[in-house]
Amino acid sequence: MDMDKQRIITHFTDAEGVKGITGLEPSDLTVGNTVTVNQIRFGVGRNPFNALNPGDIFVTELAPDATSRQLSFIGARGAKQQYAISFSDEDAFNSGTRVLPSDAEKNIFVIPANSVVNGVIEVVRRF
């Protein structure tokens, strides 16, 4: 997959989230390196703000190198900025997951709770 030619969606999360979503052990990831997985499994989101449906998972078009300020603006703060999980909108769609705008002007999108995405998924430890 050439991620440069597709719309890329990113979910920012903490160590607990990256382990639950990707199955990777967070302590095995080094800062700045990208690891590729073939599947991610989301659970149920806990934040109802801007959710379209209960349990929605928040995602964005912001890249893994987004600034702390950009991420704070969309509600990803503190430890939730530590890891970035990126996948193509096409892989999400082909896996039966639709990326829907929640507040597109603020670059906030959602996917349904319990979504599974198959494809080339990149995981980056930001700090």
Image: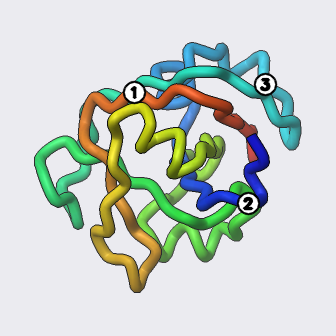
Image x and y of residue 126, in percent: 75, 47
In which quadrant of the rendered view does residue 50 lie?
A: bottom left
Above or below, comparing residue 74 to residue 4 in the picture: below
Res. 50 visible in picture = yes
Residue 116 numbered tag:
1
How far from the left and from the top, in percent, is residue 42? Answer: 38, 29
Cα distance in 3D space between marks 2 and 3: 26 Å
Question: Mark 2 highlights which residue?
Answer: 5
Q: Earlier in the sequence, mark 1 or mark 3?
A: 3
As measured in the structure, the alpha-carbon distance from the residue carrying label 1 to the one carrying label 2 is 22 Å
At mark 3, the secondary structure is loop
Q: Earlier in the sequence, mark 2 or mark 3?
A: 2
Q: CA distance from mark 1 to mark 3?
A: 22 Å
SS assignment at label 1: strand
Within-10-Å neighbours for mark 3: few <14, some 14–19, many 20+: some
Name the residue at 25% across, 51% down.
47
Disc 1 or disc 3, which is closer to the eye?
A: 1
Seen in the picture, residue 23 relative to 118 is either above or below; the reply is above
Q: Dividing the picture into quarters, in which one does residue 24 lie?
A: top right
Question: Which residue type does callout 2 highlight?
Answer: Lys
Residue drawn 78% across and 47% down? 2
- Identify the residue at the far bottom of this view: 105
Instruction: Say the numbered circle drawn on residue 60.
Output: none
For the residue pair 110 and 125, the one nearer the viewer reads as 110
Q: Earlier in the sequence, mark 1 or mark 2?
A: 2
